[in-house]
Image (spheres, rainbow, N blue to C red):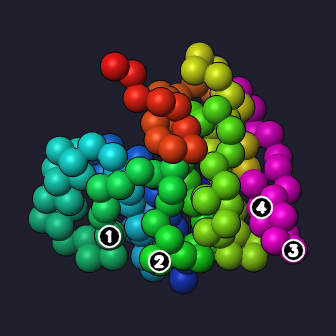
Amino acid sequence: QALELKGTAEVLEIGTGSGYQAAILAEIVQEVYSVERVTFLTERAKQVLEKLGYRNIHFKVFNGTLGWPEHAPYDAVVVTAGAPEIPDPLVEQLKEGGRLVIPVGDSLSQDLLKIRKVKGKPLTEDLGAVRFVRLVGEHGWEERG
């Protein structure tokens, strides 16, 4: 709901996981670009979703904190893991007026933030307290050893 999606939208999803959210997004928007850092999760989600007939979901194994610049700009970006701060590359890859929804805070609790790009600058709205797994990557948390 916070993403304010329309049928012609192109959405970047950070954190494919099982692919469930990608499938929901694919029912609402024109194209979904889903980035996951775990190869096994990407391959499994891709296999299931292609078998179900989804053709508007694109997958990439990559550092999600860097987004997917080749297909930018996006109407919306949704992040399914908590970040210590808002990753600049994700804001940069938004279209003007685009929305980014991301949990931001420490490793135990975050605030769900909605960032709208207005005149090239991020305007932030706090949607409330949440708790997500850690977003690992260059603009997120370091991988635990």
> As drawn, is 73 to the left or to the right of 120?
left
Q: CA distance from mark 1 to mark 2?
A: 10 Å
- Nearest the viewer among 81 and 50 is 81
Instruction: Give the amino acid at mark 3.
Output: Lys
SS type, badge 2 = helix
Would you identify the image quadrant in which residue 86 lies? top right
Question: Which quadrant, please, contains the N terminus?
Answer: bottom right
- Residue density around tag 1, few if under 14, some if 14–19, many if 20 or more, within 10 Å: some
Q: Mark 3 = which residue?
A: 119
Q: CA distance from mark 2 to mark 4?
A: 19 Å
Q: Earlier in the sequence, mark 1 or mark 4?
A: 1
x then y, percent, for residue 74: 58, 73
Residue at image coords 67%, 55% = 88
Instruction: Tell me what residue is drawn at x 41 percent, y 50 percent.
Output: 63
State yes or no: residue 45 in magenta. no
Q: Is residue 91 above or below residue 30?
A: above
The numbered mark, 2 or 3, whose residue comes first in the sequence reads: 2
Q: Secondary structure at mark 4?
A: strand
Q: Which residue is mark 4?
A: 116
Residue for point 29% across, 55% down = 61
State whether the magenta stretch is mostly helix, strand or loop: strand
Q: Would you say the residues marked 2 and 3 are in contact, meaning their CB atoms lie under 8 Å apart?
A: no
Tell me the mark number nearer the camera, choosing from 1 and 3. 3
Which amino acid lies under the numbered mark 4 shown in the image of this protein? Arg
